[in-house]
């Protein structure tokens, strides 16, 4: 197939492009300079010219709690523009298959875990990343509406849990928890620091999947696209405490200091665990263990990021 991937320079996009099965397709992965997703006419002209069989929308302005709280306007508007433009231009040009990458932050903050796909818009969102979540909800609903109006079009949404891995962002302003902690612990070890602080009590639970596994899911899904549910959670189906992530990362890096909990800091949601019933039924599961994923990510950070 000829597949257009938006966000080909991002963590998810790069992992998709590197996957062994990528070579079986013609992949178009324009940079943001080559394709400005915030300009509808540009997007429409690009799709008209290249006529992809399928589009994977993985582009987005992403960041951790700090970035989301500091720039809510950008997180809402940028992601809203990109999602709407690529989906509507795909529809306009009769692209039959569309895989929309959303996020588990679309689920209501007070929803019962594990989070089922049917819970979207069933309650108030987590305020710390509400703008980003609203944009993702709009794109997800838009895909549903398109399918409702024209069932020939397969516009479906993948809802990954939190991700980490190769090509992640490690700067404190932009990164999510796992890469931020890897950077923090590598630096602490280099400085022979005696201790490291953890935001909150460390008991909040998070589900983080290695991005290489999401890329693996993408190719599995492309081969079984007709039977894939309209909206599908993709994750581990189980989670770990923040403390357990710190402990695993410290073990991999060889940091032997202590952890101090800073109870004045925000922690976001207490738990965010996806329900993987539909995923199991669809016939896919992740392959990478937490320790193995952390090892690969630490290796990438030390060999690539620190050498840049």
Image (tube, rainbow, N blue to C red):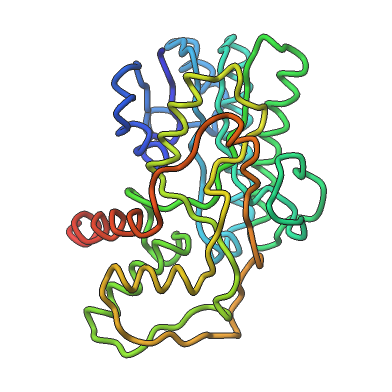
Quadrant the N terminus occupies: top left
- Residue 296: percent from the left, percent from the top? 28, 54
Q: Residue at x 59, y 19 (%)?
A: 89
- Residue 54: percent from the left, percent from the top? 49, 17
Residue 271: name its quadrant.
bottom right
Q: Which of 246/13 is in front?
A: 246
**Rendered position, 117 above or below 35:** below
Quadrant the C terminus occupies: bottom left
Figure disc tally? 0
Q: Residue at x 35, y 17 (%)?
A: 25
- Residue 273: percent from the left, percent from the top? 62, 54
Residue 94: name its quadrant.
top right
- Residue 263: percent from the left, percent from the top? 59, 85
Q: Which of 294/16 is in front?
A: 294
Farthest residue to the bottom: give it: 194
Q: Which of 303/67 is in front?
A: 303
Q: Residue at x 54, y 46 (%)?
A: 235
**Rendered position, 90 above or below 244:** above
Q: Residue at x 70, y 37 (%)?
A: 138
Q: Along the horizontal axis of the image, is 94 left or right of 163?
A: right
Farthest residue to the right: give it: 122
Q: Along the horizontal axis of the image, is 46 left or right of 134?
A: left
Q: Along the horizontal axis of the image, is 307 left or right of 48?
A: left
Q: Along the horizontal axis of the image, is 220 left or right of 157?
A: left
**Rendered position, 126 above or below 10:** below
């Amino acid at each position: 197939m000829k597949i257009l991937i938006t966000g080909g320079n991002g963590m998810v996009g790069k992992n998709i492009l590197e996957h062994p099965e990528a070579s079986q397709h013609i992949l178009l992965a324009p940079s943001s300079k080559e394709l400005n997703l915030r300009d509808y006419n540009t997007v429409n002209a690009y799709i008209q010219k290249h006529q992809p069989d399928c589009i994977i929308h993985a582009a987005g302005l992403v960041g951790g709690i700090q970035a989301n709280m500091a720039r809510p306007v950008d997180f809402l508007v940028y992601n809203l523009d990109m999602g709407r433009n690529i989906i509507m231009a795909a529809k306009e040009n009769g692209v039959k298959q569309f895989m929309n990458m959303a996020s588990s932050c679309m689920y209501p903050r007070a929803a019962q875990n594990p989070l089922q796909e049917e819970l979207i818009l069933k309650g108030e969102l987590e305020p710390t990343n509400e703008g980003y979540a609203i944009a993702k909800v709009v794109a997800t609903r838009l895909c549903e509406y398109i399918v409702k109006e024209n069932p020939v079009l397969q516009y479906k949404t993948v809802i990954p849990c939190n991700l980490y891995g190769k090509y992640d962002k490690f700067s404190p302003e932009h990164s999510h928890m796992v890469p931020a902690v890897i950077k923090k612990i590598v630096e602490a070890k280099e400085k022979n620091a005696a201790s490291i602080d953890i935001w909150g009590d460390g008991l909040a639970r998070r589900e983080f999947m290695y991005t290489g596994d999401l890329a693996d899911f993408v190719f599995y899904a492309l081969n079984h696209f007709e039977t894939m549910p309209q909206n599908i959670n993709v994750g581990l189906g189980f989670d770990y405490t923040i403390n357990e992530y710190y402990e695993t990362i410290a073990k991999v890096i060889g940091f032997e200091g202590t952890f101090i909990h800073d109870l004045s800091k925000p922690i976001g949601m207490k738990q965010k665990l996806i329900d993987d019933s539909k995923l199991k039924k669809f016939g896919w599961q992740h392959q990478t263990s937490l320790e193995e994923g952390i090892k690969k990510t630490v290796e990438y950070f030390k060999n690539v990021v620190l050498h840049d």
